[in-house]
Amino acid sequence: ATGRRPNLNIAVQDLRTILEPVDGSSIANVSWRVQYSIFDQLLRTDYNDNFRLNFALATSLKQIDATIHEIRLRDNVKFHDGSTMTADDVVFSLGPDRLRGENAPGAAVFANFLSSLADVQKINDRTVRLITRTEDPVFAQRLGAWGTQIISARARAGASSYDAWATKPIGTGPYKIGEVRNGDEITLVAHDEYWGGQPPFASIRFKRLPEIAARIAGLKSGDYDIVTDITPDHIAEIEGVNGLSIVGGEAMWFRFLTFAPLRTPILKDVDLRRALALAIDRGALADGLWDGRAKALTSWQLPIFGEINDPNRKGVSYDPAQVKELLAKSSYRGEEIPYPSVGTYYPMQLAENQALVEMWKAAGINVKLIMCENWTQVGDIGGINDTSGGAFYADPVSMLWQIIGPTNDLQSTGGWTNAEFNARGHELETTTDLAKRQAAFKRMQDIVEIEDPCITPLHSMPFIYGQQADVSWQPNPLPQMYLGPKMPPEPVA
Amino acid sequence: MKTATVETNRPSPRTVDLPTLLAVGWVLLMLFTALAAPLMAPYEITSIDLRHRLTPPVGFGGTMLHALGTDDLGRDVASRLFYSIRTSLLVAFGATAISVLVGTGIGFIAAYFRGLVEHALLLMIDVQASLPFLIVALAMLACFGNSLTLFVALMGLYGWERNARLARGLAITASAQGYASATRQLGAHPLRVYLRHILPNSAATLLVAATVTFPEIVLVESGLSFLGLGVQPPMTSLGVMVAAGREYITRASWMLLAPSLVIVITAVAVSVLGDWLRDKLDPTLK
Amino acid sequence: MSAVFRFAGPKLLRAGLSILIVVTFTFVVLRASGDPALQILGPSARAPDLEAFRRHWGLDQPLYVQYVRYVLAALHCDFGNSMLAGKPALQLVFERAPLTLALMLPALALTMLIGIPVGAYAAMHRDTWVDRSVMMLTVFGFTVPSFVLGLLLILIFSVTLGLFPSGGADRPESFVLPVLTLGLGGAAIIARFTRSAMIEVLSQLYIVAASAKGVTWRQVVRHHAFPNAIIPVLTLFGLMLGGQVAGAVLVESVFGWPGIGQLLVVSVANRDLAVVQVILLLVALTMTSANLLMDLLYGVFDPRLRGTNSGSQ
Amino acid sequence: MTLLRLNNITRRFPLGSPLYGPRKYLVAVDGVSLDVEMGRTTGIVGESGCGKSTTGRIALGLEPPDSGGVLFQGFPLPRIDSKKWRAQRRQMQLVFQDTLAALDRRMTVSALIAEPLAIHGIGDSASREQRVAELLHGVGLGEDHGRLYPHQLSGGQRQRVVLARALAPKPSLLVCDEPVSALDLSVQAQIVNLLMDLQQELGIGLLFISHDLRVVRHVSDRIVVMYLGRVVEQGRADAIIDQPAHPYTQALVSAMPRLPGGFDHYVALPGEPPSPTDRPCGCPFHPRCPLARDVCRQSLPELLPLGPERQVACHVVRH
Amino acid sequence: MLHKSFQNSAGAALLPAHGIGASATKPAISIAGLRVAFGDVPVLHGVDLAVNKGEALGIVGESGCGKSVTWRAVLGLLPKSAEIGGEARIGDLDLVGARQSVLDRVRGGRIAMIFQDPASALNPVHRIGAQITEALRLHRGLSGAAARAQACCLLDQVGIAAAASRLNAYPHELSGGQNQRVMIAIALAGRPELLIADEPTTALDATVQAQILLLLKDIQRDTGMALVMISHDLAAVAAVCDRACVMYAGQIVETAPKHTLLTAPEHPYTRDLIGAIPPSHGPRMRLTAIAGAPPQRNLPPGCAYAPRCRHAIAVCRTSRPEPRQVAARHSVRCLRLDAGTYQ
Ligand SMILES: Nc1ncnc2c1ncn2[C@@H]1O[C@H](COP(=O)(O)OP(=O)(O)OP(=O)(O)O)[C@@H](O)[C@H]1O
Ligand SMILES: Nc1ncnc2c1ncn2[C@@H]1O[C@H](COP(=O)(O)OP(=O)(O)OP(=O)(O)O)[C@@H](O)[C@H]1O
Ligand SMILES: [Mg+2]
Ligand SMILES: [Mg+2]
């Protein structure tokens, strides 16, 4: 049967060969992209359908009390090695050895995505209880975000070492790991016993091809079916070729700038920081540099957040007049503000860096771009930094709180901190009361936008793919590429 | 046949031919551009125009507004090119000179001294040859930070080991030849033997080495600006322009073409001049 | 045998020393100039995770402790694991080294096969338009950056003509374009050096004498001038052998060629020390063997260098 | 007064690289002793390849002997390439045998001749120019030749350039390695006269290496005859040529072409010239010697006096 | 440019060499009006010369007068900067301006040349055996063991000991004299009709010189090869050659059978030359050198030797002498002979 299905060739700009999804080094776009097709989580977020939660490895989710959830597992889910998934696998996958322990390989993923999970208990072969430390308003969403990938406990026990395991883990996803050539090529092979139906491709080959021009050439010559990380400037070129098309653009991933006033004394001045944020013409970046593919982001509000969203909140926008006012008010007298950047980490990063510097210059702020070779240098300099983040699930916890929470680098490296912000953030994360949450969220936004700015949004960062027109594939607004079979929606309540 | 009364005692010097003239002309033009860049550039090199990105040059659908088109930030390619010539000329000529001089010097010293000194120098050469330049650059950056003078010096390290080995090989061959030992037996200081005799006799090869080193440095330099060394935004150089243009090779080829052409033509000019110089140095060709 | 050792001994000693210096230097530079934890876990990693990573890889120890540990382990042939791939660095490099080699060797062969005849041809026709245009072409050859050349070749031969794959290393046809890209630049350089060496040689009396013997011009060039001209070219060739790994980086990245050139760059960027060290070790070994080979070849081509008192007087 | 004394010097050359097979040695000079007096000429004649040039180079300190000593003006030579050694070059000069190789082909004749003056800082540029003109004239070249490059000269012209160069710093010891072999008779006469004049004027000691017995006889006070790296006979010049004692010297003299008659006196030596890598034991000349006896095949004859001012190394002749 | 004035064979009759027996012996080579200039500087001013088959001709003359250039020009071995005019015929073939492929067959095969400077004339990177066998292969079609054996023979012939093992030697391993003998062996390898020996024994000691010269003579006699020997040693020329030419400043000034030349030279330069021979007997004394220097670069308007000539008269400084037959096979280029005022 595998013979008739096509093989898919994907050229990517970078690859990582550690494929264990909860490994610390897996917190990266390039890892998510590949791992997404190898594993299933307990729940599945349908990013293309308003982040709707669907059942995946779990087929029911019952809240027993404030901190206890009970799930029933799907029957007859086969791991890549042919064994059947049981509650033991879930207990192990979410257990201290893999995920929750302080020294577990999954500690970083756990802290980022599942920090509220306190215990996992097997009720019977098909039923598991998940116990949270506190109330968690977004617990279900978390289960469908990242980190609840279930692996085969037996296979893990059989692996000679964690390192050996991490390069070839066994999951339940639509594809299993085939040949892996370190840092160069990963081939996934259809897992025909997949519970969700027959995977549409016999195999998927991810090939590392760091040069964008080479990726495009490869796409044109038909060597690849899909190429990733296309920048807006190449869209017209690809669309101009018969049989090629561009997909992607809708994005729930965003670019931000952070300020480190505690590391860079000039930035202590709140007015200066506000001026910095207001001097940015986000529309010009999104429309000019990104050719309209990116959307300017002015606030922390996203429609997918639903009830907690406040459509009336203005956020920050380009306002030269106010910048002038603020600067006059401030103690800033044209000192040089360092803006370290590695220049090549994000698409269009260097261009954007330079555009921003020019915008600030026009506003009378003297920002100096400093090219760095590595993050240590960037961290050492402080000043203004580039960062990015996305909505893994439809809640501000995943955005504002995840991006500059106390464990994130801005705070942990002492660039900025704010006690009230942290307290409110904690509240946002641990209370289910909508009104309280709305209040907390509002306060947090006031702090980072007006009272003690430390971060300012720029725009969405679209993931643009070029592909052969006959490939039927729909990208996510997030970096994950889902290449498995279409599954009917099984919405969670 | 001309009559025997022609009173030329000296062989007539080769007249400077057309390619050489063109080469001289080009190099002068580059020097002029380097000096007059601020006067020639119609725009500031940093002035960004995000609404007029990637406009093609005049003649390819563009306007005289940006004769050579604009780049990915809507900056004027011509203006950037002029400034780039200025930086690259400084960096590449300076560094090529250093690289060839240092290399030749060390090569000659290694050839002259036998024993420990030679081994020590060869060790240096081996180390440099097995170390990717990237790591050397990182070391420089970590130790000394970034300044243009230092950067030129660092770039001077590029390729010195190749020049050193070439020079050593040439010197060893040359000193095995009669004229070197003849001069030596006159009581000449080794410096004289090496500088006045072996150097001119090895010049042909060393000049070729220099012409090869020159474009290499232009290109390597661009790689280093991403490490935070040397030429950094908003400054620009030919290498930086080429590197930026490579993503746009099909989309906006002028971004790559303009600086590439300057590099190539300059390299051609330099090598034509090198050939001319070599011929000048070789009386047997007269 | 002992004589051979006397000849090779100092060279081997030097090679050993240079490896030690390279390893130490690289160790210090990579460790001092960037934090692998940050590089690998990314800028948004949490402090405790960074801590854990550092602890796991021993990065929390003082530098000298790390160094001594590294050297001791290396002496026992344990070159450490790649932090990025979680595999032994040695294995990682050895998976890829053959591919780089498979690219380098034909490219070097191409370099010689094109460079030497072209250079010799230009020398024989020196100062004619043939010579001038060939030399002009060679300048293009080594001035056009390899990524541009590679992309152009891809655009022509893969995209337009569809003759060769645009990347990858899995089919025999895959070799054509990268080898061409890597080889042509080198060939241009070799051609220039060959020309200049050849011109030097062609003015020697023994060339006249060979003609006087009735040897045809072609044979004079091939048999009498060539072996003399090849000696300086060999020096360059030896240097190229060593420099190829670094030179392969761009070509590898354009063609998605999974060689050690790219691995090196990625590993340096990520401060994946173990991998960098193994690659440098390999490069140093290649250099040493290339040097020894060159010494042998010099002797083969130049009998005057076979005696110990050659060169010196 | 003795200007230069070679004491039992030996020079071996290793053959081949250890990489290319086992080591062999070639003994180029084997226990040679000779003197050069101030203002006098010592000639060396002998088979080609018998070590004349090597002896000359060792005498000048351009090459260290493997054993034995060289005394110049009573003192051992300074270490090669040391400062003192370089300064001493002014007094000790060599006229090269291979003139094409010895001249840097990128320099004009004037520059080449002026070079030793510049090296030793003799005179200013004007006086150097004058001296160059003088020297060019002295060796029978015109000023026009000064502007040419070595490859534009004929063999004889080059030889004279080399000579002029050696004479430039007014050395006190001159080793002439075949200085006239490529010169026509008239120029040869001119050069020989020049050398002899200079010798009288400045008291130069000459070590004159040549194949031309006629010239050697004419130029030298003493002649040293070498065979296969060893001195086989030495004595006053006219005596050696007019009454050669050693069978090899006899053969040499007989082979001298004469006018008229050419090779009428020539007595061909039997056998082949020996190879220096494969020296016969006993007297090196015995395989070709018409007088050879058993003792010649077994023991090496020493150089012993035979009459006044004359030494011969031969078992037979001395009896 | 150069106009070839002696194109027809009638012109050859003017050549002094053809005074007698021109019908009996055909010339191995006849050179007429050979002119060479480097850039603007003329070096040969019209050399007329014929070498008969089986004849041994000696050429002596001022160093730098063009002896070597003459033969290099004939063989097409001068650098491109040389302008060559006149003609040099072997049989019906004019070598001046001949095509490369024609020259290749002539060089080494019909005309071989031994160079003055053996150390630079041998290729340093080839074993001498290979250099000899190359010539054997080119001109005698020998290869492999046969060529080696023949090369051995040749080395033997020129007096190199242990020939077989020496075949494996490199030029730098041999002394100058040994190299010169290798050169001779290479030249002999092609069994040429004409061997040009440009100072073949300058680097050789007397015994070997005698051996080589006699060997050349023998070979010349046995094979009927013509031999041109350029030498400074009149005695050596006398010993080997039948006839001798004296060159001065790019022209041949006197040609005569060797006895005539040595005993009754007519040209003042020849006389002075002979006068400069160092005596082989008697006490040391000053040698008689010729005063002055040869003309440099450009000739004086009259006789080239006039400025140095002890017998020069006014006319010598104004008009050029033409060769004049003074006896059978003896021609001289001197105005005073024409005028009859000298003698
Ligand atoms: N650098 C060297 N390496 C090896 N052998 C050498 C070297 N120099 C000289 N020889 C050998 O030493 C011997 C003596 O050489 P030398 O040049 O002194 O001879 P010569 O008497 O000057 O001969 P000629 O008269 O031909 O110049 C020769 O057999 C020569 O091959
Ligand atoms: N390549 C050249 N360029 C310019 N002039 C040259 C060149 N070759 C030779 N000459 C000149 O031609 C003249 C004749 O040189 P040639 O070598 O024939 O002299 P020769 O008679 O062989 O002298 P010798 O006896 O010294 O060898 C010389 O004056 C020389 O300067
Ligand atoms: Mg000698
Ligand atoms: Mg000559």
Image: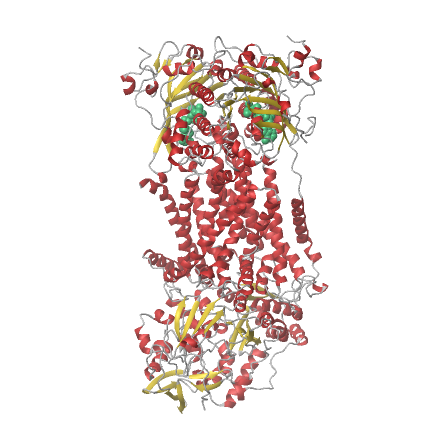
Residue B148, quarter of picture? bottom right
Q: Position of residue B56 (x, y in %)?
A: 66, 65
Q: Position of residue A431 (x, y in %)?
A: 46, 87
Q: Position of residue A37 (x, y in %)?
A: 43, 77
Residue D117 visible in this rendered orientation of the protein: no
Residue placed most toward the observer, B145 or E32: E32
Figure quarter occupied by ligand 2:
top right
Q: Quadrant of the N terminus of chain D?
A: top left
Q: Is residue B211 above or below residue E327?
A: below
Q: Is residue D124 above or below residue A26?
A: above
Furthest-right residue in this view? B64
Residue placed most toward the observer, A211 or D267: D267
Q: How many marks?
A: 0
Furthest-front residue in this view? E23
Residue A304 visible in this rendered orientation of the protein: yes
Residue A361, quarter of picture? bottom right
Q: Position of residue B9 (x, y in %)?
A: 66, 29
Q: Is residue C119 above or below residue B224?
A: above
Residue placed most toward the observer, A447 or D23: D23
Q: Quadrant of the C terminus of chain D?
A: top left
- Model colouring: secondary structure
Left-right relation of D78 to A160: right
Left-right relation of E173 to C229: left
